[in-house]
Image (tube, rainbow, N blue to C red):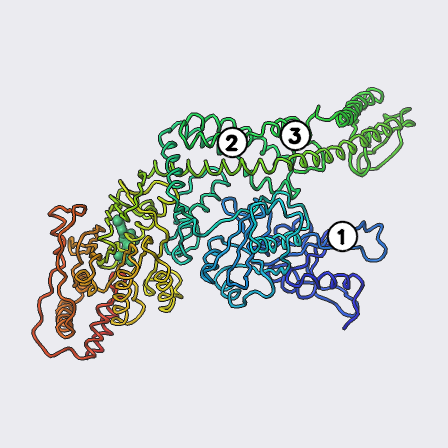
Amino acid sequence: MAKFTPMIQQYLQVKADHQDAFLFFRLGDFYEMFFDDALKASQELEITLTSRDGGEERIPMCGVPYHSAPTYIERLIEKGYKIAICEQTEDPKQAKGVVRREVVQLITPGTVMDGKGLTDKENNYIASISEFQDGTIGIAYNDLSTGESQVTMMNGGQDEVMNEISLLGAKEIVVGHQFNKDLEKTLKERFIVTFSYEDDISSKEEYAPLLVNIQHEKMVQTVSRLLNYLHRTQKRSLDHLQPVSIYQLQQFMKIDYYSKKNLELTETIRSKGKKGSLLWLLDETMTAMGGRLLKQWIDRPLIDHQLINSRLNMVETLLEHYFERQDLRENLKEVYDLERLAGRVAFGNVNGRDLIQLKKSLQQVPFIRSIVEQLQSQESDRLIGQLDALEDLTDMLEQSIIENPPLSIKEGGVIRDGYHQELDQYRDASKNGKDWIAQLELQERERTGIRSLKVGFNRVFGYYIEVTKANLHLLNENRDRYERKQTLTNAERFITPELKEKEALILQANEKSMELEYELFLQIRERVKGYIPRLQKLAKAISGLDVLQCFATISENRHYSKPEFNHDRRIVIEDGRHPVVEKVMGAQEYVPNNCYMDPEREMLLITGPNMSGKSTYMRQVALTAILAQIGCYVPASRAVLPVFDQVFTRIGAADDLVSGQSTFMVEMLEAKNAIANATQNSLILFDEIGRGTSTYDGMALAQAIIEYIHTNIGAKTLFSTHYHELTVLQEELAQLKNVHVSAVEQNGKVVFLHKIKEGAADKSYGIHVAELAELPAELIRRANQILNELENQHQHAPEPKKIPTSNMHEKSDEETNQLSFFEEAPAGKQKSAASTKEKKVADELQSLNILDMTPLQAMNALYELQKRLK
Ligand code: ADP
Ligand code: MG
């Protein structure tokens, strides 16, 4: 090994303890990186790679200036890296040999406290996972920026862990070195997540206040792993951490990872962004805290009737009080992010401006409280007591911090006059001195007769009297008093003994007052720390209120109605809409639909051409249920719902435009998950399941799945399918009913009505759509003929019987007529069975999704098919 310089040796020693992090090694005004860190950082950050003498050889080096380090740190964190900040921990002037350096903080994706790494309306979670001998798994998570922590135990295996991690969107996961490598690999593949290791699961004495709610030993260990990691890496006060609370998965409606994704609850499938999701639609919150809570509520809909109704009742009250709600929104707008502020107070990185914002936020609370008092409902009355305005803190801040403090807390000008006597004295001294100097300038001008003479100040030379060269001769006898200090091109600067004396006084007073101000500021900050628990409680109350007013606002703007719940497993949705599609396309355009299900109608088999609205319809039912269970009104003119314990949404692989990576295997795994976990109280959406494999195969599976759910589970199920043959199942399965979405022809074009109706869609719509797309008449004839032959040959499903429409779905004659649009195909001449080749071609022809093709693509496809028939 080459012999390194002492500093590089020191570097290597520190680095040895931080192998998995970039080591930012403080050298003067820079953070330097060496060796591999330098090579990697220069690439990731696009900064110049240089080298330095490391002893016997030159070693790679790159660095970032100290003051701009936060931006670089943010960029590395975004990419999932960790950064160890290594500072000089002794004064270089006093150091003998190499200055002592230590890592003062490890910044990781799960522990960022400020900057771009934190999004206002999103929590930044770090989670810890512990596996136990008996197969149970503990998960604890914490948002360091807000101090909130929770813990739960589960025994559902890896799937449950995946769901939980995805729901939290955890950026970092802390596990022991023995952690299940399989699961670690899957988690890494599925999510953008950084793994960290902490083997110490013993609880420390100082954790006691955080663990007051927890007795369960495994939970204590799970939480301790996380706390030990946080303390080890953060190396600073974590006074803002709130007592860890326990939650149970069974307390909430369960929506697994895939279903959440498919329903686009908090992000869209395509862009992975918030825009276009249910969260986006709902977000009328006025505070960052409310925004975060809204996401939490969407992530975990309730299943307790009473809790749901209490939210809904408050929404109702707010809806009824329009003016109060507008005022409330105005007031909430002025409320700063109290949760994160509390965290930063504990971390010691708030400045005067933050404290002023804190004060202004607290000053809103009395107004908010008086609005809530006016609401006069059971729910609002309960809230009043929680709106603690912390008057003592407000007063303290009012008396101590000036209205417009500077960003810096070290350069003075933060503390109010009159707050501290000694400070006032220094300020007086400094101010008097400055007055004296202004006076001096006038005096000297008079004495010398030089009108342009001025007294100035700079950091290097201090106070001086400046006389231009042209005027020097006017100094005359005063010249003796003036001592030259500095010569400029066209002026001379002087000092006088009295000026020198005053200068010392002023500078001293300034310096003392700045030091004292800093000290006072730290004291004030320390006092604010004492209020953290109260602030956090207030933050909870305000964010809850904010989400409820958000629900009221949305419900009013979008004409939602208050859902009712029943215990009879009955769904009645009248004029239901898909909330997001409706918003995007405009309420005028959207065609509302009803949905009726009860123990006699457990399953709806939905048929209809592509693009007719099957998927949208199914989703709107699920979203309605979810909205109701988070306590929001629903997009329908009336909704009566059961409380669902779980929602499952599966999309057939071929229809899964989403990832493009979905395989049939995944489709089946997802289906299995639903089938294995659903209960009678669940809602299942199966959207064209079985599409990812060959026709008969897929159809057989689809049918078997339907039968299984029907017979063994009895969950409310919406099953859309392009296998028209399945509609005959209505004959056999008592609780299954056919519904369809129709289309009509207008001026030779297919027009989708997006209207759900009873009964099965006409089977030949595929060919009819092909006809509308103006495929050659001869081809259409032939397709009809093949279809007919196929049907005869395989003795396919008999014609589905038209069933009488229920009351709810009574339709006008006009609409009923539209049903017959897709007329029976003319029977082809009796002919020998189509050859296998022809059958294949016909199959393919039938599966062509013509509406998704350009004319040219359609031509090409036809050409191919024709060629194969020749
Ligand atoms: P399918 O699943 O039957 O192929 P989709 O549900 O994907 O059809 O709907 C296709 C498109 O039709 C949607 O993107 C939407 O623009 C429109 N659509 C669906 N339902 C409605 C409706 N009720 N009112 C208006 N437009 C609708
Ligand atoms: Mg669809």
State the residue position of label 3: 401
State the residue position of label 2: 387
Given residues 469 and 341, the one toward you in this image is 341
Residue 359 occupies quadrant: top right
Q: Give the label, 2 or 1, closer to the camera.
A: 2
In the rendered view, tell whether residue 103 sits above or below residue 630.
below
Q: Which three-letter amino acid code belongs to the residue tagged 3? A: Ile
Label 3: state its secondary structure: loop
Confirm or deny contact between disc 3 and disc 1 (CB under 8 A).
no
Which quadrant of the rendered structure holds the C terminus? bottom left
- Judged from the image, the quadrant occupied by ligand 2 is bottom left
Residue 792 visible, this angle: yes
Q: Which three-letter amino acid code belongs to the residue tagged 2? A: Leu
The furthest residue to the left:
829
Work out how far the residue at label 2 is from the one at label 1, CA to CA, in angstroms.
45 Å
Work out how far the residue at label 3 is from the one at label 1, CA to CA, in angstroms.
32 Å
Which quadrant of the rendered structure holds the N terminus? bottom right
- Give the class, few, some or many, for how many residues have Cα within 10 Å of label 2's Cα (few <14, many ≥20): many
Label 2: state its secondary structure: loop
State the residue position of label 1: 88
Given residues 643 and 7, the one toward you in this image is 643
Query: Horizontal placement of 835 versus 358: left or right?
Result: left
First in sequence, mark 3 or 1: give its number: 1
